[in-house]
Image: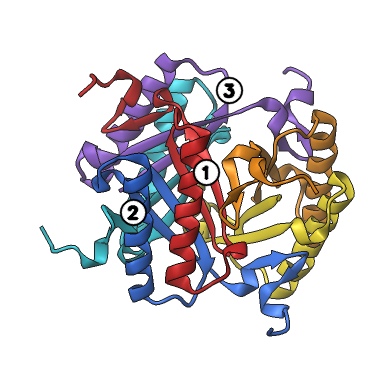
Chain colours: A yellow, B cyan, C purple, D orange, E red, F blue
């Protein structure tokens, strides 16, 4: 408790996830007043061809 | 709002997901009366060896 | 197969969900070429005080 | 992108969720280098009688 | 590890969930060869008016 | 009904998942008094570099 699940576009490095998991856990500890050991973070990579906003796959959207 | 998550057997093409995301989004707009931009669709492919019904993996079921 | 999970703000009526489930199922049948009986739709109501975008709970956002 | 889902024991106040959503979003912006507007946080309260660890519901565990 | 999430129709008693969590955990220990302490089970009650199969809400289906 | 989702570290064999799905389904049938055909089990493999506890990725933890 808590379990934090993060869906994000694939392509982030393990280094970024390492830092991100640490930051999300620290935020949980600080706000909820719990032990870090109680926090699970699970990352779930999503391909841009598997995520659509406004009915359009992100793999089909023109680059900004 | 809303977020639509679809778990489906792997093997669908990007073309099918493109059309499917569009159809799910249009249904959302029509029924809920919201902007298409408010709709996220996320596809999650599941291997037949990762999905069981009635206690049997789909990869083990005889073909119909 | 497939399982469709929809997270949406609470407040939609059963009549809307009835129509929405039907529309999402029909879209699935049409695009994937499957039987309607293979489609599960699960709605999950989310309170505006449980959903934040840009770091702000929707219950705290000024009305448009 | 990203969508952050947090399952936590029920009982947290809206004030705590407000601060928590802000903290998780700031961590996301800092680590991923994205706009805050791209971050969704969804809280899901879980009753202690709906969560078991080691096969025992938390509502049945003796208080520490 | 693992986290087991169970979506089921609302109406099950805490006594049933207590027994169910125990049974799912024991199955995990036996098959995976892990400690019971590594197993989390989370139940999520779903109203029959929030679950549709074949495009029809279970709250609308005639009783068998 | 019910749908059982299991997040576990990648590396389990199909043989283990086959046995695990069977055991989880049997537990469901026994406790809930339902038909096996009503039970879906979906496995979701998680890489150790995608799961953190106490803010540390499992891929970074020293072996026990």
Looking at the rendered structure, whether the residues under marks 3 and 2 are on a common chain is answered as no
User: Cα distance, mark 2 to mark 1?
Assistant: 16 Å
Looking at the rendered structure, whether the residues under marks 2 and 1 are on a common chain is answered as no
| Extreme residue in the front direction | D62
Query: Element type at marker 3?
Result: loop
Say which quarter of the image contains residue F15: bottom left
**Mark 1 surroundings within 10 Å by alpha-carbon count, few (fewer than 14), some (14 through 19), many (20 or more):** many
Mark identifier at residue F25: 2
- The residue to which callout 3 is attached is C10
Residue drawn at x 35%, y 64% is B47
**Tag 1–tag 3 contact (CB < 8 Å):** no
* Residue B52 seen in the figure: yes
**Mark 3 surroundings within 10 Å by alpha-carbon count, few (fewer than 14), some (14 through 19), many (20 or more):** few
**Tag 3–tag 2 contact (CB < 8 Å):** no
Q: Could you say where residue E58 lies in the image, as x and y percent from the top left?
A: 32, 25
Please state if E40 lies on the left or on the right of F22 as rendered: right
Say which quarter of the image contains residue E49: top left
User: Cα distance, mark 3 to mark 2?
Assistant: 32 Å
Nearer to the camera, F11 or C64: F11
Please state if C10 lies on the left or on the right of A27 as rendered: left
Rendered position, D62 above or below E49: below
Please state if C9 lies on the left or on the right of D64 as rendered: left
Query: Element type at marker 2?
Result: helix
- The residue to which callout 1 is attached is E18
């Amino acid at each position: 408790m808590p379990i934090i699940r993060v869906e994000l576009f694939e392509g982030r490095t393990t280094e970024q996830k390492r830092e991100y998991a640490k930051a999300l856990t620290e935020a949980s500890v600080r706000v909820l007043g719990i032990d870090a050991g109680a926090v699970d973070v699970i990352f779930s990579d999503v391909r841009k061809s598997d995520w659509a906003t406004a009915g359009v796959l992100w793999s089909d959207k023109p680059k900004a």
